[in-house]
Image (cartoon, rainbow, N blue to C red):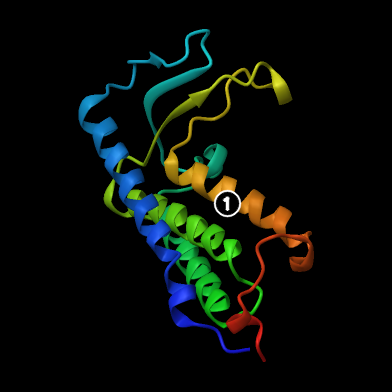
Amino acid sequence: MKVDTKSKVLPFLLSGFIILLDQGVKEFIVTHWSGTRILDVFGNDFLWIIHVRNKAIAFSLGHNLPDSLRPLLFIVLPIIVLGLLLGYYLKSKEFFGFRRWLFAGIMGGGIGNILDRIFRPDGVVDFISVKFYGFLGMERWPTFNIADASVVVCCIILLISSFISPKSVAIKPSKKEAAD
């Protein structure tokens, strides 16, 4: 199967867009938003824009780790994982069509948060807080950002798409990709 390089590289425009959007909004939040200021977007306490920092990873996992261990676990390890995923993506025949764009969304989100961990010593900038109505014992979902949302949404859709046969979906490998 010969794969067109352009069709594998083009989705990384989405990665770049996510990184730029994520970092741009985070910069706005850092420079224009105090931590205690809450913007209730839809009323009824559903969606807040609030500036918080997270020195750990998702759900504040690892916040009790020693400062000396955090760079290894939260910067070096994710860079290695993203590098391995990229290598797999470039060599694999499993990524085609829409799945490439989902992979690029995951990469863009991952890079967005790694940039925060490298260049923002106070932690990753989180600013989206959503009411969770007591589901799973949480009144509000842990505060997140655009990069987090991109990773989670793209991972979920990619996972769902892995259970669907390419023959049963409208998005199929191109004739060029399917040729052996």
Image coords of residue 132 (percent x, y): 63, 21
Considering the numbered disc 1 on the image, is that residue within a helix, a strand or a loop?
helix
Q: Is residue 131 visible?
A: yes
Q: Is residue 69 visible?
A: no
Residue drawn at x 48%, y 35% is 144
Q: Residue furthest bottom?
A: 180
- In this picture, residue 48 sits left or right of residue 29: right
Residue 26 occupies which quadrant of the picture? top left
Which one is in front, 61 or 90? 90
Is 125 positioned to the left or the right of 174 in the image? left
Residue at x 43% of width, y 41% of height: 146
Task: Pick out the residue farthest to the left.
Answer: 31
Q: Quadrant of residue 31?
A: top left
User: Which amino acid does the dot numbered 1 rest on?
Assistant: Cys
The image quarter in which residue 33 lies: top left
* Placement of 52 over or under 81, stated as above or below: above
In the displayed structure, 71 sits above or below 44; it is below
The picture places residue 126, in percent across and down from the top left corner, at: 41, 34
Taking the image as shown, residue 76 lies to the left or right of residue 172, namely left
Q: Which residue is mark 1?
A: 154
In the rendered image, residue 160, in percent from the top left (x then y), is placed at 72, 53
Picture quarter with the N terminus: bottom right
Which one is nearer the viewer's eye here, 161 or 4? Answer: 4
The residue drawn where x is 51% and y is 11% is 45
Residue depicted at 54% across the width and 42% down the height: 58
| Residue 30 position in % (x across, y down) | 26, 33
